[in-house]
Image (cartoon, helix red, strand yellow):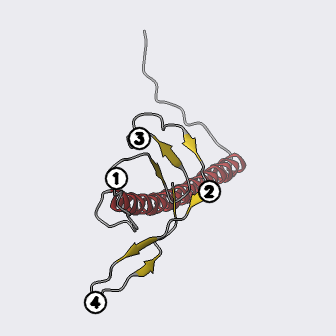
Amino acid sequence: MFTNSPPRAQGVSKTNFDSYVKANDAVMRNMQNQNQVLQNQGQNLQAQLNNLATSNQRLESMLSNFIKMNTASTSGLGTLPSNTITNPKEDLKGITTQSGVAYQGPAIPSTSSSPPKVMNRATEVTKDTMLPTNNGSTEDVQPPVVQV
């Protein structure tokens, strides 16, 4: 027959128990240290993330300002400096830009096609006379120099 006997108490010596407590305390301290290290790393990562977010906002602001300035300068909202001289013959032979680039032909090149042949020419100076309205005398008038 099988009988239930009460469990026997196992004896643990004081030395063994003290060793167990010391080892357990060491493990707990190690875990607490690791937890503190992880918390510090988390705080450092959060600070870096905040710095990146701030830098990103500054970059977005700079880019937005750049786009606004570029759009304003190309949207036709302002006036460009000019010294337009009319062509009395109404005959377009070419266009020369302020930078000295000359475009041959009757049409202004569009931005979608390749530019026409570019030629640099010598400057031609002309002298015109004009009748003033105040005293009836003639006076020499020098127009600005334009490359043709």
What's the distance in space between the residues labelled 2 and 4, CA to CA? 99 Å
Comparing 116 with 136, the one in front is 136
Name the residue located 27 percent from the left edge and 84 percent from the top edge.
133
The kind of residue on which mark 3 rests is Pro
Amino acid type shown at disc 1: Lys
Name the residue rendered at 35%, 86% in the picture.
137
The nearer-to-camera label among 2 and 4 is 4
What separation in Å lies between label 3 and label 4 (alpha carbons)? 43 Å
Could you say which disc has been placed on residue 89 in the image? 1
Q: Position of residue 52 (x, y in %)?
A: 49, 57
In the displayed structure, would residue 13 be above or below residue 113?
A: below
Tell me the quadrant of the picture where the N terminus can be found.
Answer: top left
- Percent coordinates x, y for residue 60 in the rendering: 41, 58
In which quarter of the view is residue 10 placed? top right
Question: Disc 3 designates what residue?
Answer: 109
Residue 64, image x and y in percent? 38, 59
